[in-house]
Image (cartoon, grey):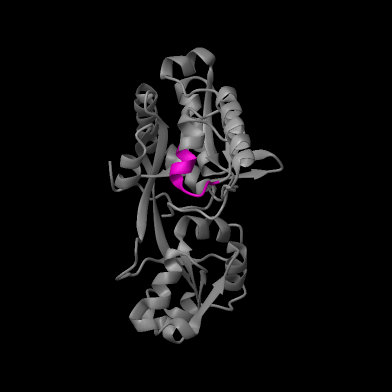
């Protein structure tokens, strides 16, 4: 789970002029933003505004200007079940999730534009919830997990991490998985760790069989590997000492839109019971993992 994010870093300038311009920009943004709304207001307008991340495949991304992904489909299903139309708004990640909640749920982006009625893929974390009183975070719908895609011909069907003392494993630089591998068993895996920066590079390395394992967030790896005819086997071995091997994601609404929050919770429960939620994940090659928290 990432509370700090590399994208969308705000530029900070010193001096009176820069400060004045920033204040004016903020005022314009706030005046142009559209406030989050209650359930009755959403239904009266016949429109649900759903915020999803712009570059978060397989959950949300833009394909020639058309929003696609798991969260996009869930957003459309929410609107359909509520009996309204949907507007999907894709936005870049901020420096922290707190920034995203502020920009997308209760204040609006500094560059102008509407806030959303609901924001997708928000990590459900106690400290995050405590820090953000203006937002309601919850209604979990998926559990993210750290996992390893393996080549069973080289690792065996259910290997332990020690297999990577002789076989190579790829991992994205600077991630939780990277830190874990680098320090596992006193650093004994380091000679066989292959780093990459762009996720596609790691996928290609695995498909070329340059490495026998590929570690990262399971949903992302499944989504990208699912585009290849080569099927991957996933394992989730014990990871002693890892900062976090799983986390739950849900939605966020503005604090005064709790009736909308409860209505969305009911719809998500219906989608899960009917199997529609799992079907959405399956269409994107991702295993649906029900959240372990309620």
* Residue 167 in view of the camera: no
From this view, report whether residue 287 is shown above or below residue 191.
above
Q: Residue at x 50, y 26 (%)?
A: 79
- Indicate yes or no whether the magenta region holds residue 185: no
Image quadrant assignment for residue 166: bottom left
Relative to 222, is 3 on the left or the right? left
Relative to 151, is 272 on the left or the right? left
Provide residue 164's location: percent of width, then percent of height: 43, 81
- Indicate yes or no whether the magenta region holds residue 94: yes
Quarter of the image with the N terminus is bottom left
Total marks in image: 0
Image quadrant assignment for residue 240: bottom left
From this view, report whether residue 246 is shown above or below residue 25.
below
Residue pushed farthest front? 16
Provide residue 202's location: percent of width, then percent of height: 58, 68
Q: Residue at x 51, y 49 (%)?
A: 95
Provide residue 203's location: percent of width, then percent of height: 58, 66
* Residue 252 in view of the camera: yes
From this view, report whether residue 6 is shown above or below residue 25.
below
Residue pushed farthest right? 64
Provide residue 111's location: percent of width, then percent of height: 62, 35
Front in this rendered view, residue 229 or 41 = 41
Q: Residue at x 39, y 58 (%)?
A: 145
Front in this rendered view, residue 127 or 22 = 22
Quarter of the image with the C terminus is top left
**Which region of the structure is painted magenta?**
93-101
Q: Residue at x 39, y 85 (%)?
A: 188
């Amino acid at each position: 789970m990432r509370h700090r994010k590399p994208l969308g870093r705000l530029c900070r300038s010193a001096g009176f002029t820069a400060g004045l311009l920033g204040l004016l920009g903020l005022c314009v943004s706030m005046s142009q933003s559209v406030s989050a709304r209650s359930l009755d207001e959403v239904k009266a307008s016949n429109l649900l505004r759903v915020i999803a991340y712009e570059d978060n495949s397989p959950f949300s991304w833009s394909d020639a200007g058309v929003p696609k992904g798991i969260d996009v489909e869930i957003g459309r299903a929410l609107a359909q079940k509520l009996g309204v139309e949907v507007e999907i708004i894709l936005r870049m990640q901020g420096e922290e999730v707190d920034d995203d909640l502020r920009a997308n749920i209760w204040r609006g982006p500094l560059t102008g534009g509407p806030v959303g009625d609901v924001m997708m893929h928000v990590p459900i974390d106690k400290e995050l919830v405590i820090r953000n009183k203006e937002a309601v975070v919850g209604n979990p719908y998926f559990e993210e997990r750290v996992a390893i895609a393996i080549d069973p011909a080289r690792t065996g069907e259910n290997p332990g991490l020690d297999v990577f003392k002789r076989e190579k494993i790829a991992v994205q630089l600077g991630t939780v998985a990277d830190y874990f591998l680098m320090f596992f068993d006193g650093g004994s895996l380091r000679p066989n760790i292959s780093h990459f920066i762009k996720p596609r590079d790691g996928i290609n390395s695995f498909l070329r069989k340059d490495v026998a394992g590929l570690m990262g967030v399971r949903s992302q790896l499944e989504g990208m590997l699912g585009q290849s005819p080569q099927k991957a086997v996933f394992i989730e071995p014990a990871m002693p000492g890892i900062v976090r091997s799983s986390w739950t994601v849900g939605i966020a609404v503005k604090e005064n839109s709790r009736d909308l929050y409860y209505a969305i919770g009911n719809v998500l429960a219906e989608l899960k019971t009917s199997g529609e939620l799992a079907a959405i994940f399956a269409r994107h090659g991702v295993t649906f993992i029900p959240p372990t928290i309620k």
